[in-house]
Image: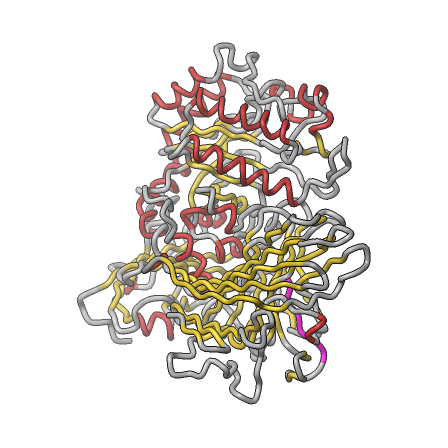
């Protein structure tokens, strides 16, 4: 529901308003971003009323009195470092309908003195997400324009008193004066949980307060920031002091972007999500991704992946058979299959993407066919950017190498890796392809030219993904960079699965990724490897994997687990399959329970008829921690039957004394209203052998019990 007057544009969707001032021929200034103002609210008024007008430019300029981080930082040999753009055209359009509707505001501007042209696009998506990007072009000049940074930002209310550089239950900082910055410099964003940055009212949480979240959709180096200028929150003339903003952009290397006349630079999309708590802000990202035309619609298959080098065909055959036996549906052949891989990654195999005949004398196709004969789909692991120093490729083409990376911006290098990838997919016909980013690119520069491989490398990576998707429709692509790297919205427009982190980390380790990525796109593995920190599947870490796209890993070196451990693995997989339709279509609900040792996570169906919640309590947590579980997200007016899901690791023939006793009213379930479950909570049953309690909630026809 977009409207425009002579001086302002009002974009509205899903309970969110964005009011943009477009008068005075200045760059678009945001008057309000937050809760819906309604049709009757005058768009010239800010979110705090007429006494506090919050007109902050999407690309703030020093020339307009801004004293914080500038929207555009750059120069021409020291000149034109402060821009003053003048708007020449404003256009408002609406495209699509329903969940795919987009309200788009486009602004054209120019700085005649600096010989720069600018296009700014702001979109309100149907989910209530706001996203913006800008393109700058050099139209002349005696020297190239060196662009150091382009930072897009939106103002947040003065009610925002805290900043969360790592959104989740922890890591709150006062929103004090100055700049709070989170930067990713390793060539991938998000490995340390920094894919998002949030600001919110004091004490905000998943279900508490107001929150404003920003995300830079870029698979390379990024910067997120929250900034508060000095002084009281007021405006003086065209400038401002005291404004609070959040935003970000690509983190560019020095001298990386030099714009000659006719050259341009397009920023990544920067997303902004407002919500009554992190859950609502998160749901806007999830709804946006689920509205994609090619969003996965079939059940998300259980993925078994081999890890490690030194492969053996007999061993691989046994692993494939074991995968089928425990209920896996995909078998992904991981690293070590390529030429030289048998000796270890440090001795080769990375970069020489030809099948190692020492491991597969007849090629890889017979093994792929054998996997398919077991009823499994076959997948292949590939690391297009990583090169071993001892590989044939590195020796024969040193000009293609940048540090430990293949310079994909080099046309010849790109053509080579594209040919290898397409040839392998054509021959083996995998249905799942893992594209891994193994090593950080911190100071990598091309060995021949010395040019950095930052921006251009990421663009080339996108081109590689676009090409393989176009050539092989239906191929499922997983982008992996362990620890949550490359879990961004731009890569998710090209991928069907991203790696969050090992479930063997703490229950809360995937929280930041889960805020951005819906469960069906987030790869989470059961800790099934025998050598993984000495852990099996007998703890709460296994339950974490239920809340994503479940998989597990086989170590190429370790023996196949015992019969008992295989049975445990099968039990978790059966539990996942039982509930995956709900888990991968419902709304995610997180808990505001204090402390990292207590977790409550749930998924509620869109129609609010059913839900599944998981409660975990770490070994070091107090036995009395969170005795009442507040089950949020349900319809307060409905009655629900709550039952305890049988622990997947509980023996079928367990004697009564072997199982922890349940409260009497848990035996057949209890009927409680949605209002009571959220406001008062329900007593937590004792945990079983797995360390997690799963609660099944279904709509009931009977009246709630009285307590």
Q: Quadrant of residue 37?
A: bottom left
In the foreground, 446 or 478: 446
Can residue 371 be seen? yes
Q: Which residue is found at the position 46% from the left and 37% from the top?
A: 477
Secondary structure mostly seen in magenta is strand
Q: Quadrant of the C terminus?
A: bottom left
Residue stretch in magenta: 225-230
Above or below, 328 relative to 652 = above
Q: In which quarter of the image is residue 569?
A: top left
In the foreground, 549 or 19: 19
The colour scheme of the drawn protein is secondary structure
Can residue 624 be seen? no
* Residue located farthest toward the right when viewing the structure as drawn: 78
In the foreground, 392 or 75: 75
How many numbered marks have been drawn onto this rendered protein structure? 0
* Residue located farthest toward the top when viewing the structure as drawn: 361
Residue 459 lies, in percent from the top left, at: 59, 42
In the image: residue 359, left or right of residue 114 = left
* Residue located farthest toward the bottom when viewing the structure as drawn: 51
Q: Which residue is found at the position 31% from the left and 58% from the top?
A: 605
Above or below, 235 relative to 453 = below
Q: Quadrant of residue 660?
A: bottom left
In the image: residue 320, left or right of residue 22 = left
Residue 541 lies, in percent from the top left, at: 50, 48
In the foreground, 529 or 340: 340
* Residue located farthest toward the left when viewing the structure as drawn: 701
Is 283 in the magenta? no
Residue 671 lies, in percent from the top left, at: 25, 67
Above or below, 193 relative to 240 = above
Q: In which quarter of the image is the N terminus?
A: bottom left
């Amino acid at each position: 529901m977009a409207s425009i007057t002579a001086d302002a544009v009002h974009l509205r969707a899903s309970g969110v308003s964005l009011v943009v001032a477009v008068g005075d021929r200045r760059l678009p200034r945001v008057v309000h971003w937050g809760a819906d103002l309604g049709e009757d609210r005058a768009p010239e008024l800010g979110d705090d009323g007429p006494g506090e007008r919050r007109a902050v430019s999407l690309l703030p300029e020093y020339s307009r009195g801004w004293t914080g981080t500038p929207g555009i930082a750059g120069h021409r040999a020291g000149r034109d470092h402060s821009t003053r753009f003048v708007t020449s055209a404003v256009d408002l359009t609406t495209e699509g309908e329903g969940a795919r509707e987009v309200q788009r505001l486009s602004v054209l501007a120019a700085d005649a003195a600096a010989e720069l042209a600018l296009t700014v696009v702001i979109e309100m998506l149907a989910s209530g997400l706001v996203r913006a990007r800008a393109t700058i072009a050099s139209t002349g000049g005696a020297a190239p324009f060196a662009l150091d940074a382009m930072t897009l930002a939106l103002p947040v209310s003065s009610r925002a008193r805290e900043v969360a550089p790592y959104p989740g239950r922890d890591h709150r900082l006062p929103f004090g004066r100055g700049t709070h910055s989170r930067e990713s410099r390793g060539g991938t964003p998000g490995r340390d949980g920094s894919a998002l940055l949030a600001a919110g009212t004091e004490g905000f949480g998943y279900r508490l307060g107001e929150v404003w979240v920003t995300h830079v959709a870029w698979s390379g180096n990024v910067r997120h920031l929250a900034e508060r200028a000095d002084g009281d929150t007021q405006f003086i003339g065209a400038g401002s002091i005291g404004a609070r903003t959040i935003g970000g952009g690509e983190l560019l290397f020095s001298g990386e972007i030099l714009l000659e006349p006719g050259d341009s630079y397009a920023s990544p999309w920067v997303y902004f999500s407002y919500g009554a708590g992190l859950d609502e802000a998160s749901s806007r990202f999830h709804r946006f991704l689920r509205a994609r035309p090619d969003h996965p619609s079939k059940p998300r298959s259980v993925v078994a992946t081999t890890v490690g080098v030194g492969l053996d065909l007999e061993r691989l055959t046994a692993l494939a058979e074991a995968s089928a036996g425990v209920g896996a549906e995909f078998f992904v052949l991981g690293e070590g299959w390529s030429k030289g891989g048998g000796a270890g990654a440090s001795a080769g195999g990375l970069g020489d993407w030809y099948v190692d005949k020492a491991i597969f004398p007849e090629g890889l196709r017979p093994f792929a066919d054998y996997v398919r004969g077991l009823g499994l789909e076959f997948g292949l692991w590939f690391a297009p950017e990583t090169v071993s120093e001892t590989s044939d490729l590195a020796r024969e083409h040193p000009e293609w190498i940048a540090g430990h990376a293949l310079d994909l911006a080099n046309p010849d290098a790109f053509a080579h890796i594209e040919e290898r990838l397409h040839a392998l997919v054509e021959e083996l016909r995998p249905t799942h392809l893992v594209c891994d980013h193994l090593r950080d690119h911190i100071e990598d520069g091309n060995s021949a030219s010395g040019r950095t491989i930052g921006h251009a490398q990421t663009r080339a990576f996108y081109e590689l993904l676009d090409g393989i998707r176009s050539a092989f429709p239906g191929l499922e692509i997983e982008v992996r960079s362990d620890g949550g790297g490359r879990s961004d919205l731009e890569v998710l427009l090209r991928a069907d699965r991203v790696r969050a982190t090992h479930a063997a980390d703490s229950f809360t380790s995937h929280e930041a990724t889960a805020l951005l990525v819906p469960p069906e796109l987030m790869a989470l593995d059961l800790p099934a490897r025998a050598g993984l920190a000495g852990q099996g599947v007998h703890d709460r870490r296994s339950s974490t994997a239920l809340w994503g796209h479940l998989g597990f890993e086989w170590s190429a070196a370790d023996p196949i687990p015992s019969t008992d451990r295989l049975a445990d693995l099968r039990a978790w997989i059966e539990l996942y399959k039982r509930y995956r339709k709900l888990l991968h279509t419902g709304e995610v609900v997180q808990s505001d329970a204090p402390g990292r040792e207590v977790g409550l996570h749930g998924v509620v169906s869109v129609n609010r008829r059913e839900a599944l919640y998981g409660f975990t309590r770490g070994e070091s947590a107090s036995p009395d921690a969170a005795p009442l579980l507040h089950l949020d997200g349900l319809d307060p007016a409905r009655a629900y039957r709550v039952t305890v899901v049988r622990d997947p690791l509980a023996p079928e023939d367990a004697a009564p004394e072997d199982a922890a006793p349940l409260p009497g009213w848990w035996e057949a379930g209890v009927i409680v209203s949605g209002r009571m479950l959220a406001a008062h909570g329900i007593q937590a049953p004792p945990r079983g052998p797995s360390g997690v309690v799963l609660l099944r909630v279904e709509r009931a026809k009977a009246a709630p019990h009285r307590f």
